[in-house]
Amino acid sequence: MSMVDSMWLTILDALSLILSKSQGEAIVLEILKGYQAFTQACGVLRAVEPLNSFLASLCKFTINIPSDPDKRSSSQSPGLKRSEHLVDQRDGVVLTPKNVQALRTLFNVAHRLHNVLGPSWVLVLETLAALDRAIHSPHATTQEISAAVPKFTRESSGQYSDFSILSSLNSQLFESSALMQISAVKSLLSALCQLSHQCVTEDVSGVGQASSQKIGSISFSVERIISILVNNLHRVEPLWDQVVGHFLELADNSNQHLRNKAFDALDQSICAVLGSDQFQENAAFRLHVESCDMEDLHTELRSLECAVVSPLRVLYFSTRSNDVRAGALKILLHVLEMHGERLHYSWPSILEMLRSVADESEKDLVTLGFQVIIT
């Protein structure tokens, strides 16, 4: 540890300088191996400051950043503001071979250190959100391919492999959360929520590029949170409150686009759990369990089912907004259509919502409530 403390800054300065000046594939790969090795050593030793500094430096080489002094100075900070300008000129993003190799190195580091990154996940996620925006930009390209060539032409001709590979690596990182320690998954979820919350608290009501980037980062966070949930259905209980808590926050936002995104995320999450093999197996096992174990099993199933359905009740009763209440009822309608036969313990909450609908003056809510009843 003392060796890392005494040497990390010198090593980082040297690697960063050489990497910034180098273009040859062989030398770039060797320098990035050095980045990966020292970053992993810092992570294993829980050396937080060197770890964050190496990660921030590595992320600077992943996607081209405008070189004006203000943006260059802010990029040296590991804070969330870096995400605001990672892809400032989204339509002109060009990934060089060095950028692609740096991104692959970042994925390697994240996979190897996933159980120890903790709050440092934010640094990784900022870059992955920027990469996600670049992947989905119709004008983004790798250096060897002309940006004038339409994206569908590049993909169909097999010349778009860099973005395809990076997109796959981006997805695989979150799918691999099934293999992480539960504390690491919670840290990753916290970082995704932090990235999303940072954008939510800023102005996303405009139509400009900055607003589009912020909404893009929120979309990235929401999609990856759902991916983590889907890949951890075998241990969903300790993660559930953290996941739906963020979606409920988004549902309370004044931006209609974000509210709709939150409704869709809640719908997907609830249906994913109720439709999972684990939930089905537990329900079937209830019918065959010995009587001495019945009470404990009922308690466990009741807790899980009520926790999964309760966000709809919270969403409905936490606001007077007809739009939000209609969103809650639409989700409930879809959940009952898809998995109503699996529900046993959450009907009191559902019926409480429907009784409340009878007192509403908004005819659309009454119509939705009636549709739910006859489902």
Image (cartoon, rainbow, N blue to C red):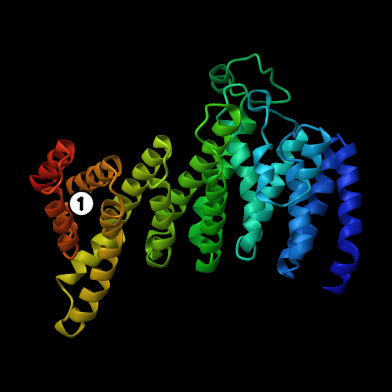
Task: Name which residue lies at 19% across and 61% down.
Answer: 349
* Residue 73 percent coordinates (x, y): 81, 43
**Occupied quadrant, residue 41:** bottom right
Residue 172 showing in the rendered view = no
Secondary structure at badge 1 equals: helix
112 sits to left or right of 225: right
Task: Name which residue lies at 18% across and 71% down.
Answer: 286
* Residue 314 percent coordinates (x, y): 29, 57
Q: Is residue 36 above or below residue 82?
A: below
What residue is shown with label 1?
A: 339
Q: Is residue 41 above or below residue 167?
A: below
Q: Is residue 238 above or below residue 89?
A: below
Task: Name which residue lies at 90% across and 44% down.
Answer: 17
The number of numbered badges drawn on the structure is 1
Q: Residue lying furthest top in this view?
A: 148
What amino acid does circle 1 point to?
His
Mark 1, residues whose alpha carbon is within 10 Å: few (<14), some, or many (≥20)? some
Q: Residue lying furthest left in this view?
A: 374
Residue 358 showing in the rendered view = yes
Image quadrant for the C terminus? top left
* Residue 121 percent coordinates (x, y): 62, 56
102 sits to left or right of 164: right
72 sits to left or right of 234: right
Image quadrant for the N terminus? bottom right
* Residue 308 percent coordinates (x, y): 30, 59
Task: Name which residue lies at 52% across and 61% down.
Answer: 185
**Occupied quadrant, residue 116:** bottom right
Q: In the depicted view, which residue is nearer to us: 21 or 172?
A: 21
Q: In the depicted view, which residue is nearer to us: 67 or 39?
A: 67
